[in-house]
């Protein structure tokens, strides 16, 4: 799919955002918040689910992170390609409707199997949410206002995370208190899933009525319509799915070098995952998990999913090299790769904090699950608004004065200082001190999202933002949701339930984050200035 520049006599790209643009931002940001709500609500409902369905912690861990991330990561790639070629508002509305239905299906689970199936459905449905939303926003907001737009995304993400705990805890407790005999066997946690699914149905209808923005018009680089978006999306799915990808390589007449890279890469991934399985089994032995009659070692399941995801990423890059060299040239720029790694490592910290802090408050201070969900959930939601509200406009202000490096400096400040506050927070002697310290910690921790996201999507052409977002998401998901909670869990088991120390330990990635960011600082302007040059080198007619 080619990209063409706007004719010289065309109107200059506008810097103004219309009322329709702000309305679109409101809806797609709300979609992002709902996706986090439906994804995260399992964490606060886990104790009740465990008691009702007689599940173990390892099975809940598979439901919360591993199974979700596997299908989320796989389908984000072909759906990201569909974002770049089809009607994004329609795709987003269909996705919201689908994941809301699957979230509601969780309410009828009477065992592990149906709950697992519903989580897979939520993962597939949410796979296109962020690529669609980001692409719509970047074709609605000019470059000078994108930091503010991404701040809105950060706000709704925090609201989704926070309200998932407040909603889940309060609704489940209300139902169980109002109907202690559970009429029809319907428990409070099941009712909470049902309530969480309803807003998405209305939002899907509203987004289906949004006007589709012209792709690239705001940047002055218009992309013509894609004649076969579903065919291209299906080809991406075939090219990245392990096993089927070899048929894709054969049909595209891949050379010996491509086959060698693929097979040697697979061998390296297998050896790495086997080694990590052995290391983690020795570090924190765990009993087998009963999954639909099969006894599976949780460590084996964990590293199988990681290996699967790594092979999907390798296949995706090979597919781009064979079918879309301009996108391959831009996505593999050092700045994008390093920023993606930073986002993944930092997301592992964020998911570890949000996933285990409710349990930490319960164990360390004796707070009830309902009180924890309400207090911590609402606090996290409120703080999640303030950080992006400050960071978004500040990111735009810095960009206007020192260019892309201003965004990097803001990210360095947020991620460089936050671990210090994290250590201080999880050593609080009582709940009041914890909440006070967490306030400062959260405000600093949430400032990295707007500048980093804006940096990534400004380093590719408009037609590439869906695929770029998908690659960004799969790496972020594997490192964040796939690794963060798992790492904290095995450290906590090793330390006999010391969650405070386990949560702090995830900051071991901090030096790597800073090295990556300082490397980006010294080359981001160069990468940004050569976007069109590298696209042309790949054959892009711009």
Image: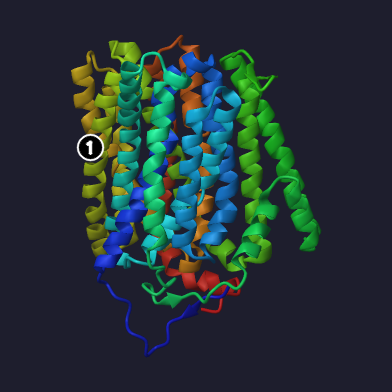
Q: Residue at x 37, y 61 (%)?
A: 137
Under circle 1, the secondary element is helix
Residue 221 appears anywhere in the view: yes
Observer-nearest residue: 361 or 234? 234
Judging by the rendered image, the residue that carries numbered circle 1 is 382
- Compared across the picture, whether 11 is left or right of 103 comes to left
- Total number of numbered labels? 1
Q: Position of residue 99 (x, y in %)?
A: 49, 43
Question: Vertical placement of 288 versus 14: above or below?
Answer: above
Q: Residue 46 location, x and y as percent?
A: 44, 21
Dividing the image into 4 quarters, which one contains the N terminus?
bottom right
Residue plotted at (26% across, 59% down): 396
Above or below, 284 against 442 in this view is above
Q: Position of residue 413 (x, y in %)?
A: 28, 43
Q: What coloring was used for the rendering?
A: rainbow
Left or right placement of residue 419 versus residue 106 in this view: left
- The quadrant in which residue 307 appears is top right
Instruction: Give neighbour class at mark 1: few <14, some 14-19, many 20+ (Cα, 10 Å).
Output: some
Residue visible at 49% across and 14% down?
493
Image location (x, y in percent) of residue 536: 55, 75
In the displayed orientation, state which residue is furthest to the front. Answer: 184
Q: Nearer the viewer, residue 110 or 451?
A: 110
Tell me if residue 332 can be seen. no
Is residue 44 positioned above or below 385 on the image? above
Q: Residue at x 62, y 66 (%)?
A: 324
Residue toward you, 28 or 206: 206
């Amino acid at each position: 799919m080619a990209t063409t520049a706007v004719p010289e006599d065309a109107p200059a790209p506008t810097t103004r955002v219309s009322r329709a643009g702000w309305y679109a931002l409101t809806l797609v940001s709300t979609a992002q918040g709902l996706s986090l709500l439906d994804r995260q609500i399992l964490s606060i409902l886990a104790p009740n689910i465990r008691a009702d369905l007689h599940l173990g912690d390892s099975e809940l861990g598979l439901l919360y992170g591993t199974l979700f991330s596997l299908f989320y990561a796989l389908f984000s790639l072909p759906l990201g390609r569909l974002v770049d070629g089809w009607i994004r508002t329609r795709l987003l509305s269909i996705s919201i409707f689908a994941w809301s239905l699957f979230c509601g299906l969780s309410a009828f689970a009477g065992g592990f199997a149906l709950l697992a199936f519903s989580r897979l459905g939520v993962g597939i449905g949410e796979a296109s949410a962020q690529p669609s939303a980001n692409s719509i926003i970047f074709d609605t907001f000019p470059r000078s206002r994108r930091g503010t737009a991404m701040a809105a995304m950060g706000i709704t993400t925090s609201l989704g995370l926070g309200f998932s705990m407040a909603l889940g805890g309060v609704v489940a407790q209300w139902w169980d208190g109002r109907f202690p005999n559970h009429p029809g066997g319907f428990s409070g946690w099941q009712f909470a899933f049902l309530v969480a699914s309803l807003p998405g149905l209305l939002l899907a209808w509203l987004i289906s009525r949004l006007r589709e923005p012209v792709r690239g018009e705001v940047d002055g680089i218009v992309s013509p319509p894609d004649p076969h978006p579903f065919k291209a999306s299906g080809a991406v799915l075939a090219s990245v799915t392990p096993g089927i990808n070899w048929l894709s390589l054969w049909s595209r007449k891949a050379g010996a070098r491509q086959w060698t890279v693929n097979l040697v890469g697979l061998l390296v991934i297998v050896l790495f995952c086997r080694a990590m399985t052995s290391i983690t089994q020795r570090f924190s032995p765990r009993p087998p998990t009963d999954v639909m009659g099969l006894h599976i070692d949780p460590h084996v399941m964990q590293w199988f999913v990681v290996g699967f995801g790594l092979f999907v990423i390798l296949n995706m890059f090979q597919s781009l090299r064979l079918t879309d060299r301009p996108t391959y040239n831009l996505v593999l720029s050092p700045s994008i790769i390093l920023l993606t790694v930073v986002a993944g490592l930092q997301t592992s910290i964020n998911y570890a904090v949000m996933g285990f802090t409710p349990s930490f408050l319960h164990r360390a201070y004796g707070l009830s699950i309902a009180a924890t969900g309400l207090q911590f959930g609402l606090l996290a939601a409120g703080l999640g608004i303030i950080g992006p509200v400050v960071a978004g406009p500040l990111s735009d202000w810095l960009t206007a004065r020192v260019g892309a490096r201003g965004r990097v400096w803001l990210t360095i400040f947020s991620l460089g200082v936050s671990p210090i506050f994290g250590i201080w927070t999880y050593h609080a002697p009582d709940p009041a001190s914890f909440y006070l310290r967490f306030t400062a910690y959260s405000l600093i921790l949430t400032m990295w999202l707007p500048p980093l996201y804006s940096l990534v999507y400004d380093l590719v052409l408009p037609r590439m933002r869906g695929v770029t977002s998908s690659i960004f998401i799969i790496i972020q998901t594997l490192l964040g949701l796939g690794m963060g909670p798992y790492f904290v869990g095995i450290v906590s088991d090793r330390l006999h339930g010391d969650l405070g120390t386990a949560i702090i330990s995830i900051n071991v990635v901090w030096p790597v984050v800073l090295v990556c960011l300082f490397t980006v600082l010294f080359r981001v302007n160069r990468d940004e200035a050569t976007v069109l040059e590298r696209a042309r080198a790949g054959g892009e007619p711009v």
